Image (cartoon, rainbow, N blue to C red):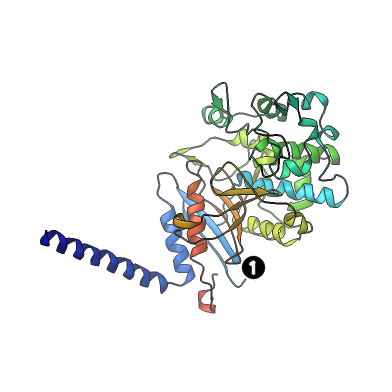
């Protein structure tokens, strides 16, 4: 017993010593060294083959970008659901111009045929009463036509088997084949569903008489001089997304998911857009401040006004207890602002295997930012 006790004590001393040594090395690193370590460890050549990120403090005293693996700094990648921030921008602009109102209901924009059976809950059809505000805050109760199964298979699984084009009518019909989760506007309830933003895209097109690509171009890309950002089409060129070690063929499907997930961009452009979105350059910031955050079906996620809020607290917050506001994408993209650190961060792990990977990386990178920056610690 004495021998076992001695061995345990020695083992504990070695473990503590290793942890202390590691902490001392880490505490003596400047921010750029910390970022490099985190980015190096993000690429495992199993799920993640390349990652890229750009981080900036709100006052721009910190500006740093880095790429690892098979991605370069300027590479264009699939933004996925970060697109919802772009679509929300168009909606807020149209509200500001009094072309629509957040309280407007779907019967003002969709046909009777489109509304028929859209939100049939407990014997009543609530589809016509869904508002623009409910669409943009994911409080309609509509199901997620992308991940929920119809006839034993989700749309995501179908795309994995066969990449193809989709029309809005097909997304709408698929949603009608699924059960809504609650009556639209139920207090404290939210459910993340891509169809909400598909509908917002159609509303924007019908109100303006312009297609979504033109709306994005005229209202966002050109004013912000986003030269590497576009709405994906069938032959768009961007970094191939990986899924469980293989290339995930999504060009056709991605070109169909315009308002909910069709943007492709790079970190330079995405940072410009994220700052403009958050800081009132594209529309008044009070549109973001209104309303309440509501939990959605994904752990640690809340939603309102086209934005996700993500935060891990308690035991699991080993890299820090940071609130992230912005959006992520199912193909590894991220675009968030951290109020605690006052930094913006954008980038991608460029994979659809595990959504926790981009969050882990973002938390590690945010946690690497020193609260007190000196000139020698500023990124280049």
Q: Position of residue 242 (x, y in %)?
A: 49, 41
Residue 291 location (% of width, % of height): 73, 52
Q: Quadrant of the N terminus?
A: bottom left
Residue 209 visible within the image = no
- Compared to residue 334, the image places residue 63 above or below, namely below
Q: Would residue 104 be visible to someone looking at this image?
A: yes
Query: Residue drawn at (83%, 49%), measured in percent from left and top?
Result: 95
Q: Compare residues 353 and 289 and report the one nearer the observer.
A: 289
Q: Quadrant of residue 56?
A: bottom right
Give the residue drawn at x 48%, y 69%: 31
Name which quarter of the figure residue 207 lies in. top right
Residue at horizontal 46 percent and vertical 72 percent from the top? 30
Q: Viewed as shown, does residue 134 lie left or right of 13?
A: right
Residue at screen point 66% across, 46% down: 83
Quadrant in which the C terminus appears: bottom right
- In the figure, is residue 339 to the left or right of 358? right
Q: Which residue is mark 1?
A: 58
Across and down, in percent, residue 218 comes to: 79, 50
């Amino acid at each position: 017993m004495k021998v076992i006790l001695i061995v345990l004590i020695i083992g504990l001393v070695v473990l503590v010593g290793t942890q202390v040594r590691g902490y001392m090395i880490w505490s003596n690193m400047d921010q750029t060294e910390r970022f490099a370590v985190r980015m190096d460890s993000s690429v495992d050549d199993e799920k993640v083959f390349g990652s890229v990120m750009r981080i900036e403090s709100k006052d721009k005293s910190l500006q740093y970008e880095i790429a690892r693996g098979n991605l370069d700094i300027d590479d264009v990648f699939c933004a996925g659901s970060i697109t919802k921030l772009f679509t929300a921008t168009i909606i807020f602009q149209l509200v500001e111009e009094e072309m629509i109102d957040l309280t407007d209901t779907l019967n003002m924009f969709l046909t009777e045929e489109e509304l028929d059976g859209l939100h049939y809950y407990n014997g009543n059809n609530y589809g016509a009463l869904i508002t623009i505000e409910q669409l943009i805050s994911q409080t309609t109760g509509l199901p997620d036509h992308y991940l929920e199964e119809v006839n034993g298979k989700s749309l995501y699984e179908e795309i994995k088997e066969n990449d193809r084009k989709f029309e809005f009518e097909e997304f709408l019909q698929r949603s009608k084949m699924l059960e809504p989760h609650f009556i639209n506007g139920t207090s404290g309830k939210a459910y993340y569903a891509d169809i909400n933003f598909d509908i917002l895209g159609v509303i924007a097109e019908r109100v303006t008489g312009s297609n979504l690509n033109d709306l994005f171009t005229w209202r966002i890309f050109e004013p912000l001089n986003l030269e590497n950002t576009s709405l994906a089409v069938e032959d768009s060129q961007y970094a191939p997304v990986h899924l469980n070690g293989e290339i995930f063929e999504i060009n056709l499907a991605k070109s169909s998911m315009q308002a909910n997930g069709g943007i492709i961009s790079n970190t330079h452009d995405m940072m410009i857009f994220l700052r403009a979105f958050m800081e009132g350059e594209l529309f008044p910031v009070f549109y973001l401040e209104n309303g309440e955050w509501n939990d959605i079906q994904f752990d640690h996620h809340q939603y309102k006004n086209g934005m996700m809020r993500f935060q891990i607290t308690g035991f699991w917050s080993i890299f820090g207890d940071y609130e992230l506001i912005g959006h992520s994408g199912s193909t590894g993209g991220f675009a968030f602002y951290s109020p605690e650190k006052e930094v913006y961060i954008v980038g991608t792990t460029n994979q659809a295997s595990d959504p926790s990977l981009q969050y882990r990386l973002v938390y590690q990178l945010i946690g690497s930012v020193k609260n007190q920056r000196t000139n020698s610690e500023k990124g280049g």
